[in-house]
Every structure is written in structure tokens, then in C-alpha cells.
Amino acid sequence: MGTPEQPQCGFSNAVVQILRLHGVRDYAAYNVLDDPQLRQGIKDYSNWPTIPQVYLNGEFVGGCDILLQMHQNGDLVEELKKLGIRSALLDDTKDQDSK
């Protein structure tokens, strides 16, 4: 909830931070606090009761907890790769390996 520049909830902030860690800058975000119909509509659409909701290439992934789990186990790097996005974490690992 809120915006990527000003998340208004800890879970939304965590999602934004995870995406930033991976170097993902180009994504759509909607402030559902501004629109109660949108907030309820997205919950109905996904059959998922909480916000934020993360979609990759239009496919529902889950909420903050799922994205965090994907980040921790490496699945997010693989999912981003399928979309043609190279995770910035791969570059950080490469840089540290060369030191």
C-alpha cells in the first residue's frame, strides 16, 4: 500500500526493497489505499486476502511472504531470468567472488 517511493505498510516496503535488491526498477504499482474498489477488486481477482500482491508477467505470485521466500531460496532470480531480467544480486556475487 502506498507507492514504491513512499510505502505506507511494512509489507509493501519489504516488497519494494526486495525488488530493488534485484535491480528491478520498471514495474507497475498501484496505491490501493486511494481506491477501495481497486483494493477489494484485486483481492477478489486473485482470491488472495492480503495486500501487497505481486504479479510477474501478469501471473499472480503471492504476497510479501511468498516474495521473501522466493528471494531467500533463489527462486526469484530464476523467475526474473525467465522474464529476461538479470538479477543485480548475480552481479554482486560475481564481484565478491573476484575479490
Image (cartoon, helix red, strand yellow):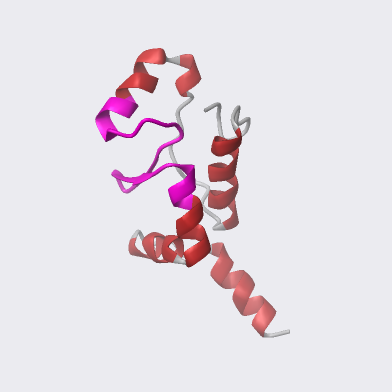
Q: Residue at x 42, y 64 (%)?
A: 75
- Which is more toward the observer, 27 or 77? 77
Q: How far from the left and from the top, in percent, is residue 67?
A: 46, 50
Label total for image = 0
Q: How far from the left and from the top, in percent, is residue 17?
A: 60, 47
Residue 95 covered by magenta stretch: no
Q: How far from the left and from the top, in percent, is residue 1?
A: 52, 28
Q: How far from the left and from the top, in percent, is residue 8?
A: 60, 27
Q: Quadrant of the C terminus?
A: bottom right
Q: Is residue 64 left or right of residue 45?
A: right
Q: Residue at x 55, y 30 (%)?
A: 3
- Which is more toward the observer, 84 or 14? 14
Q: Is residue 80 above or below residue 33?
A: below
Q: Residue at x 62, y 33 (%)?
A: 5
- Which is more toward the observer, 91 or 74? 74
Q: Is residue 4 above or below residue 94?
A: above
Q: Residue furthest right?
A: 99
Q: Is residue 3 above or below residue 98?
A: above
Kindly indicate the quadrant of the structure image that contains residue 97.
bottom right
Q: Residue at x 41, y 37 (%)?
A: 53
Kindly indicate the quadrant of the structure image that contains residue 42.
top left
Q: Residue furthest bottom?
A: 98
- Which residues are the magenta region? 42-67
Q: Is residue 28 above or below residue 32?
A: below
Residue 58 covered by magenta stretch: yes
